[in-house]
């Protein structure tokens, strides 16, 4: 087998159920309870019984051995588990691993899950160790790292804080259409709102940074032959790939070019589609700079051209690119690791178009006739990059 | 000490020991004739182990820079930058001696060893003298 044969994972597995739980504020609920509740709701959505689950995939900032703790809590004895921790993109890599394990016949039903109660217990929660050669200088991680990338991006391509702010404005416009979004009833943002928000680490202010919320999520995966018999529209994994080049921002080879260039190229190649075929684009927007970098790195425009691409609300509900249609980490939900929510939105958009009832949105909140979505996850400090391409059956 | 660990301490501790002696030392791979940072037991990516410690020139260029906002009672705003050393590698550090939000990408800086939170640390100042780019 060589690298090209990896295409034999294309369309072999599908998500047949999903759920989120405790998003926003979930006072009185533990991270495990939120995560487990998401799993049970996702199984209900799929119409699959708990005791059919034999593959468990999980990560949180609250459990160092999340897959094992979750399995125990659920009362499962999995034949395969993976709790790889590569930051917020972990779940998109779990999906790749789950697809491999399902395709190899090691397991029949996989759950990928996450839960966090960071907001209700006091704020941003991380289990990241202090970085040698960096910690001494007291960077405010992860914000400082993204600010260093943003500053360099502004320097190389002549971007302004207004260009970054355009991303936050469009994300909020999407959130205003999504009753599940934390900022659904908080009104629109203007560029001026973003620029005048409290500075955190220049050039990033508070509204350039993601929300800090509680929340959990889960997806259920099976092989495609079984997926056809479940009650929902199966959404097929057409492509998946990961890559990372650094852990510490001081080791990042190029602050304005992430390894998403590599992960997305291989994921799109596996899928046999290209970036511009995607009907919805779900990018891990922990900070406004992320959306600019990932639009470029995934191939929606050339390096430096995202500045123009996001102008005039072009990535908002009325724009030509349907980006972060739930409101994103900036305006929908961000419990510390956002990757599974990127995935949920990519799949929900496709299921809605296919006729499933996956919730209400105000006008324009659901993308018409969506058949292909890209979900892109980021972890650490622009470190781990994982791209998943999802499609309905006719895209197989 | 296990037989395969050469030297008295690992490279991280060695780096700190040098700083305590007032020396900013970085590693160089002899066979590749290349410097690297941060300190490691072998050259990153290809694994060469013929390494030596060399005193850094201390001259570098601001690659990116931020002003980290902090309450005055907790010490106030401070600069945090990535510095590309003239030898090639990049490192995180603070640039001092100017307002934390006035540091510019591309500025030449020069290292000194200072004490930060009780430990010796490489800190950079704006390099004010005329300076010829290394060839």
Image: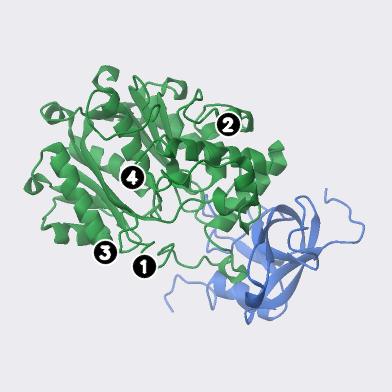
Colour used to depict chain B in the structure image: blue
**Quadrant where the N terminus of chain A is found in the figure:** top left
Provide the secondary structure element on which disc 3 rests. loop
Name the chain letter of the residue that bears numbered label 3.
Answer: A
Q: In this image, A22 relative to A106: left or right?
A: right
The location of residue A110, given as percent across then percent down, is: 18, 43
Q: In this image, B76 relative to A287: left or right?
A: right
Residue ID at (29%, 23%): A353
The residue that mark 1 highlights is A121
Residue ID at (33%, 45%): A340
Residue A385 in sight: no
Of the residues under marks 1 and 4, which one precedes in the sequence? 1
Labels 3, 4: front one: 3
Whether residue B63 is situated above or below residue B11 in the rendered picture: above
The residue that mark 3 highlights is A30
Name the chain letter of the residue that bears numbered label 1.
Answer: A
Of the residues under marks 2 and 1, which one precedes in the sequence? 1
Task: State how far apart marks 3 and 1 are (Cα).
Answer: 9 Å
The location of residue A98, given as percent across then percent down, is: 24, 42
């Amino acid at each position: 087998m060589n690298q090209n044969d990896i295409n034999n994972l294309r369309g072999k597995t599908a998500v047949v159920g999903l759920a989120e739980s405790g998003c926003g504020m979930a006072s009185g609920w533990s991270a495990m309870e939120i995560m487990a509740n998401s799993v049970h709701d996702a199984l209900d959505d799929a119409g699959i019984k708990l005791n059919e689950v034999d593959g468990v995939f999980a990560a949180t900032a609250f459990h160092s051995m999340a897959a094992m703790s979750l399995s125990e809590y659920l009362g499962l004895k999995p034949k395969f588990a993976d709790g790889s921790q590569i930051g917020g993109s972990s779940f998109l890599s779990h999906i790749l691993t789950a697809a491999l394990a399902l395709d190899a016949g090691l397991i029949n039903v996989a759950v990928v899950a996450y839960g966090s109660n960071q907001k209700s217990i006091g704020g941003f929660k991380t289990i990241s160790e202090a970085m040698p050669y960096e910690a001494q200088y007291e960077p405010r991680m992860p914000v400082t790292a993204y600010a260093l990338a943003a500053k360099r991006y502004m320097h190389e391509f002549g971007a302004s804080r207004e260009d970054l702010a355009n991303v936050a404005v469009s994300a909020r416009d999407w959130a205003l259409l999504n009753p599940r979004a934390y900022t659904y009833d908080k009104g629109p943002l203007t560029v001026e709102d973003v620029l005048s928000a409290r500075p955190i680490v220049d050039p990033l202010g508070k509204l350039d940074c993601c929300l800090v919320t509680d929340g959990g999520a889960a997806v259920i995966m099976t092989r495609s032959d079984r997926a056809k018999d479940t009650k929902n529209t199966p959404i097929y994994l057409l492509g998946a790939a990961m890559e990372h080049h650094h852990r510490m921002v001081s080791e990042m080879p190029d602050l304005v070019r992430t390894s998403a260039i590599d992960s997305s190229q291989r994921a799109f190649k596996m899928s046999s589609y290209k970036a511009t075929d995607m009907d919805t684009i779900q990018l891990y927007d922990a900070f406004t700079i992320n959306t600019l970098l990932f639009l470029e790195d995934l191939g929606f425009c050339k390096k430096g051209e995202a500045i123009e691409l996001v102008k005039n609300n072009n990535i908002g509900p009325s724009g030509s690119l349907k980006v972060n249609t739930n409101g994103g980490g900036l305006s929908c939900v961000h419990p510390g690791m956002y990757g599974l929510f990127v995935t949920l939105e990519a799949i929900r958009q496709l299921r809605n178009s296919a006729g499933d009832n996956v919730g209400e949105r105000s006008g324009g909140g659901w993308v018409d006739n969506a058949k292909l979505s890209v979900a892109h996850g980021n972890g650490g400090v622009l470190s781990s990059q994982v791209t998943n391409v999802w499609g309905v059956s006719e895209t197989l | 000490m296990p037989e395969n660990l050469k030297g008295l301490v690992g490279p991280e501790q060695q780096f700190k020991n040098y700083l305590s002696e007032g020396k900013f030392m970085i590693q160089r791979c002899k066979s590749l004739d290349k410097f690297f940072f941060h300190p490691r037991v072998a050259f990153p990516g290809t694994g060469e182990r013929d390494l030596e410690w060399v005193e850094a020139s201390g001259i570098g260029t601001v690659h990116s820079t931020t002003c980290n906002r902090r309450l005055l009672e907790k010490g106030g705003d401070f600069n945090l930058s990535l510095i590309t050393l003239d030898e090639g590698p990049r490192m995180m550090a603070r640039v001092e001696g100017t307002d934390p939000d006035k540091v510019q990408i591309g500025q030449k800086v020069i290292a000194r060893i200072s004490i930060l939170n009780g430990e010796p640390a490489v800190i950079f100042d704006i390099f004010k003298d005329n300076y010829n780019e290394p060839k």
